[in-house]
């Protein structure tokens, strides 16, 4: 009687090790290029919505550099606009951020 139980336990212990017979398929999924203006839009939209400037200010230079690679004309507008925004707070920051988004041709979402 102990042998059938031992055999059943052995079979049950081995089954999870066998897994699926078809193995895992590895597949490469192509990732399209990400538009650097998405990051700009998100940052400026936060300011329009009333968020104060925080640590993201330290990444403004890299943001401008990314935009410059794809949209050199917009990069200069962005650079000047971000420099101006650094000096502002509150409603002035929100207003100028909205202006900058419009200059860059970015849609401004209104708060609901």
Image (cartoon, grey):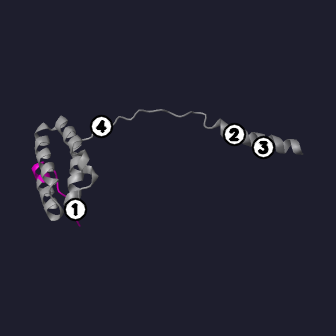
Q: Work out whether mark 1 precedes mark 4 in sequence or the reverse, and give the earlier one.
A: 4
Question: Which residue in the structure is indicated by mark 4?
Answer: 32
Magenta residues?
Answer: 100-112
Disc number for residue 93: none
Q: Is residue 7 above or below residue 95?
A: above
- Residue 12 on the magenta segment: no
Query: Visible in this render: residue 95?
Result: yes
Query: Visible in this render: residue 105?
Result: no
* Residue appearing at x 10%, y 39% in the figure: 73
Q: Secondary structure at mark 1?
A: loop
Q: Nearer the viewer, residue 97 or 56?
A: 56
Disc number for residue 9: 3
Disc number for residue 15: 2
* Residue appearing at x 14%, y 41% in the figure: 75
Q: How many marks?
A: 4
Q: CA distance from mark 1 to mark 4?
A: 29 Å
In percent of width and height, residue 50 lies at 22, 63
* Residue appearing at x 15%, y 38% in the figure: 71
- Nearer the observer: mark 2 or 4; the answer is 4
Q: Secondary structure at mark 2?
A: helix
* Residue 46 lies in quadrant: bottom left
Q: Work out whether mark 3 precedes mark 1 in sequence or the reverse, and give the earlier one.
A: 3
Q: Is residue 59 above or below residue 91?
A: above
Q: Majority secondary structure of the magenta segment? A: loop
Label 4 crowd (10 A; few <14 / some 14-19 / many >=20): few
Q: Is residue 56 above or below residue 72?
A: below
* Residue 66 lies in quadrant: top left
Quarter of the image where the C terminus is located:
bottom left
Q: Is residue 104 left or right of residue 21?
A: left
In percent of width and height, residue 91 lies at 15, 64
Question: Which residue in the structure is indicated by mark 1?
Answer: 49
Q: CA distance from mark 3 to mark 2?
A: 10 Å
């Amino acid at each position: 009687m102990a042998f059938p139980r031992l055999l059943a336990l052995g079979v049950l212990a081995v089954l999870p090790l066998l897994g699926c017979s078809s193995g895992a398929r590895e597949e490469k999924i192509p990732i399209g290029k990400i538009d650097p203006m998405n990051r700009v839009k998100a940052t400026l939209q936060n300011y329009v919505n009333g968020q104060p400037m925080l640590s993201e200010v330290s990444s403004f230079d890299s943001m401008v550099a990314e935009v410059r690679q794809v949209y050199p004309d917009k990069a200069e507008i962005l650079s000047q606009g971000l420099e101006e925004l650094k000096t502002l707070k509150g409603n002035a920051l929100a207003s100028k951020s909205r202006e900058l988004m419009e200059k860059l041709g970015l849609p401004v979402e209104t708060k609901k």
